[in-house]
């Protein structure tokens, strides 16, 4: 009877250790996934920053922007007010 209790206690210890190991593996995987997501977001932000124009617009860019704004004003006129 004492041997059965000792065996049960040992098997409980083994099961508890296995559960703990599985939890540790799951936590490690979750951390890796979060870290990878953070790295991907950082890379995307860097790419967006690099695409943005820096400094002032050149005269050609200003002229083009004015033209686009004027065309947009013609395409979407304000509705008549009462």
Image (tube, rainbow, N blue to C red):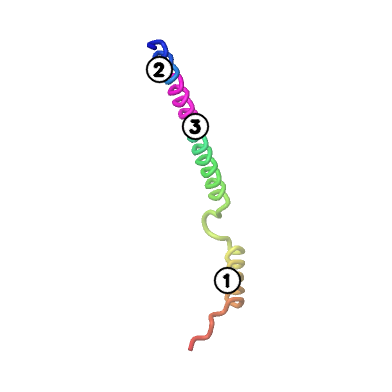
Relative side of 44 to 5, left or right: right
Q: Is residue 65 above or below residue 2?
A: below
Q: Are marks 3 and 1 in contact (CB under 8 Å)?
A: no
Query: Relative to the observer, which residue lies in front, 7 or 23?
Result: 7
- On the image, the x and y values in percent for residue 56 come to 52, 59
Of pointers 2 and 3, the one earlier in the residue sequence: 2
Residue at the disc numbered 3? 26
Of pointers 1 and 2, the one earlier in the residue sequence: 2
Relative side of 34 to 76, left or right: left
Mark 3 → mark 1, Cα distance in angstroms: 53 Å
Q: Is residue 71 above or below residue 36?
A: below
70 magenta-colored: no
Residue at the disc numbered 1? 69
- On the image, the x and y values in percent for residue 41 come to 52, 44
Q: Residue at x 58, y 67 (%)?
A: 65
Residue at the disc numbered 2? 9
- On the image, the x and y values in percent for residue 48 come to 55, 50
Query: Relative to the observer, which residue lies in front, 23 or 4?
Result: 4
Of pointers 3 and 1, the one earlier in the residue sequence: 3
Q: Is residue 27 above or below residue 82?
A: above
Crowd class of label 1 (few under 14; some 14 to 19; many from 20; radius 10 Å): few
């Amino acid at each position: 009877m004492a041997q059965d209790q000792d065996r049960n206690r040992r098997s409980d210890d083994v099961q508890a250790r296995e559960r703990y190991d599985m939890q540790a593996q799951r936590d490690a995987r979750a951390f890796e996934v979060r870290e990878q997501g953070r790295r991907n977001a950082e890379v995307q932000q860097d790419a967006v920053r690099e695409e943005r124009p820096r400094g002032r617009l050149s005269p050609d860019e200003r002229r083009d922007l004015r033209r686009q704004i004027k065309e947009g004003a013609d395409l979407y006129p304000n509705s008549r007010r009462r």
